[in-house]
Amino acid sequence: MAGLSIWIVSVLVGMFLGWFLLLGNRRRWEAEPPLETGWIPYIGCAFEFVSNPFKFMQARQNKYGEIFTCKIAGKFITFITDPFSYTSVIRHGKSLDFQKVALTISKNVFGHVDFTKYDIGNDEIHNIFNRTLQGLSLGSLTSSMMENLQFVMSQGKSSSDSSSWTIENLYEFSCKIMFEAGHLTLFGKNDKAMKGGDVEKIKQQHDAIQFALEEFKAFDTVFPALVAGIPMGFFKTAKKARKALEGRLLNKTLREQDCKSALIKERMELFDSSSSLDEHNKAKTHVIMLWASQANTLPASFWSIYYLMRNPEALNAVKNEVENILKVTNQKPGDINSPIIFTREQLDSMTNMGSLINEVLRLSSASMMIRVATEDLLLTLDSGRKVAIRKGDQIALYPQLLHLDPEIYEDPHEFKYNRFLDENGKDKTTFYKNGRKLKYYLMPFGSGTSICPGRHFAINEIKQFLSLMLCYYDMELLDFTALSPTLNNTRAGLGILQPSNDVLFHYRLKQQPAKQS
Ligand code: HEM
C-alpha cells in the first residue's frame, strides 16, 4: 500500500515538473520582444522582481531597451519602458483589456463574486465613479471632507491644553486623522450627535472607526500577496480583519448613517437592484471602496506632511499661500473650534502646495498599469517597430522608471518642492525626453480607461490636511538624527509606497494672542 502511494506521488510529481518545464520552455517568436524566463520553472523572474522592482526594471531597460517580456509567477508580462510608446497601449482599449485583470485580482483580494453575473454592469459601476467623484459632485465631497477633517482634528486637541506639546509618530498620526475623516466623508456619520455635541455617541463613532483602521491595516498588510494570487485562506488574521470590515459596512448599518457620499449612496442603490446578490457581497463592494479611497491616500498624506516639515523653503512658500487665502477671505488661523473654509477653487489656486504634492507622488508612487491581450496583436511602438504580442499575455507600464528618469527630472531622487512650477509660479506641464515634449510625465493615478476616478478628490484631501495642519498647529519633526524613512518596497506595483519606519514629531495648538481686558 505504502509502495503504491510512493509510486502515485512520484508519477504526480513527475507530471507536475514536466508541466512546469513545458511552460518554462516557451520560445521567442520572430517579431516578439526579447524574452527572459528566469531559470526556476513557473517562478521565472518573480523573486528578483519582487525583491527590488525598480532595480529589476532599470537593469532590463538597460539591457533590452524599449520593450521586453519577463516570465513572472507563471505569467508572461511584456514591459514597455519608452514613455512615447505608452500611447499605443493606452489607446489599444479593445485588444488590451483592463477589466479582466482587475476582476481576477479584485475577486481574490476582496473575496467577492463576479458582479456581472448578478446583473451589475461594469459600465454602470464606472459611470457612478465619474458622476460622484468628479465634476459638480467634487465640490460637495470636498467641502464635506473639510468639515470632517476639522471635526476629527478638534477631537484630538482642545483649546484647554493649547500650550502643551504632544509627541506622536507622524505616519500613525496622519493615518488616524485621514482615515477617520475620509471614512466619515464617504460612509456617513451620526450628524445629530456631532452637531449636538453628544460626547458619548461621538466617542462610540470615533472608536468604531479607529478599530476599522486597525482591521484595514491588518488586511492591507497581505494585499500584495493576495494580488499575486495567494489565497486568503493562508492569512488567518487578515481574513478575520476583512470579515470584520464587511460587518461594519453592511447596507443595513450604512442606511442609519447621515451625510453619506453620493458615491456610496449610488453604489448601495445599484447593488441593491440585483435580486440575487447577498448582503455580504454588497458589503464587500464597500470594502473595495474603503481600500481604494484610503490605501494610497494615507501614505501620500504622510509623505506630503513629512517633506513639508523637512524642507524650510517649501514650508515657507506653502505657509504664505495658505495665509494669503486666509487673509483675503477674512479668516483667522489658530482657533480649532472655529471652522475654516477653503473652497475647491481656493484649493486649486494653491500652486506651491500642488507642486509639492506632485513631487511627493513622483517620488513615492510605484504603481503598475496592466492590460491583458484578448487576441494576438501587433503593437506599433513610437520608434515605428512592430512587436507581436500573444493572446493571454500581459502588457505592463511601470511609470516609476519615468518618474526617476534623470533625463526628464534632474537629480531625480532629490525632493524639490517647486519642480512642478513654471517661471510664473503656475503649474508646469512641459517635461522633455530626448528633446521631445512628453505627453505622459507623471502617472501616480494611472492613465486611460483605468485612470483613478478619485484623483482630484485625493489631491484636495491632501491639500486640506496640509492647510489645516498649518492653520492649527505649530509642529516640528523630532528625530532628525534618527533613521529617515525610506520607501518600503513591499507594495511596489500597487501604488504609493509606505515609509520603511515611522518618525517622531511634536505639535501644539497655535498660541492665541492674549485677549485685551
Ligand atoms: C493619492 C491617492 C491616490 C492614488 C495615488 C490613487 C491611484 C490609483 C491608481 C494607480 C489606480 C489604478 C489605475 C490602474 O490600474 O491603471 C486607482 C484606481 C482607483 N481609485 Fe485611486 N488613487 C488615490 C486615491 C483615490 C481616492 C481618494 C479614491 C476615491 C475616493 C480613489 C478611487 C479609485 C477607484 C474607484 C479606482 C478603480 C477604478 C477602476 O476600477 O477603473 N482613489 N487609483
Image (cartoon, rainbow, N blue to C red):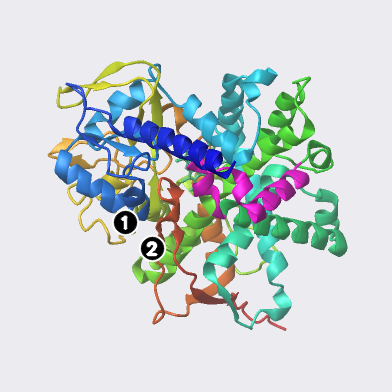
Magenta segment includes 230 = yes
Q: Which residue is mark 1?
A: 418
Query: Looking at the image, which residue is at 56% across and 26% down?
Result: 126
Q: Amino acid at mark 2?
A: Ala
> Where does the N terminus fall, quadrant-wise?
top right
Could you say where residue 230 lies in the image, as x and y percent from the top left? Answer: 53, 43
**324 or 315, which lies in front?**
315
What stretch of residues is rendered in magenta? 221-249
Q: Does residue 368 show up?
A: yes
Q: Amino acid at mark 1?
A: Asn
Magenta stretch: dominant secondary structure: helix
Q: Is residue 69 left or right of residue 276?
A: left
> Where does the C terminus fall, quadrant-wise?
bottom right
SS type, badge 1: loop
Magenta segment includes 138 = no
Upstream in sequence: badge 2 or badge 1: 2
Could you say where residue 283 lies in the image, as x and y percent from the top left? Answer: 73, 38
Q: Residues within 10 Å of mark 1 (few under 14, many from 20)?
A: many
Q: Which residue is mark 2?
A: 317
Q: Which mark is residue 242?
A: none
Q: Is residue 275 left or right of residue 385?
A: right
Tally of numbered tags:
2
Question: Is ligand 1 within 8 Å of the beta carbon of the residue shown at mark 1?
Answer: no
Q: Residues within 10 Å of mark 2 (few under 14, many from 20)?
A: some
Could you say where residue 106 lies in the image, as x and y percent from the top left? Answer: 56, 35
Query: Looking at the image, which residue is at 25% across and 40% down?
Result: 430
Could you say where residue 374 lies in the image, as x and y percent from the top left? Answer: 40, 18
Question: Is ligand 1 within 8 Å of the beta carbon of the residue shown at mark 2?
Answer: no
Asked if disc 2 and disc 1 are in contact, CB closer than 8 Å, the reply is yes
Q: Does residue 447 show up?
A: no
Q: Give the Cα distance between marks 2 and 1.
A: 9 Å
SS type, badge 2: helix
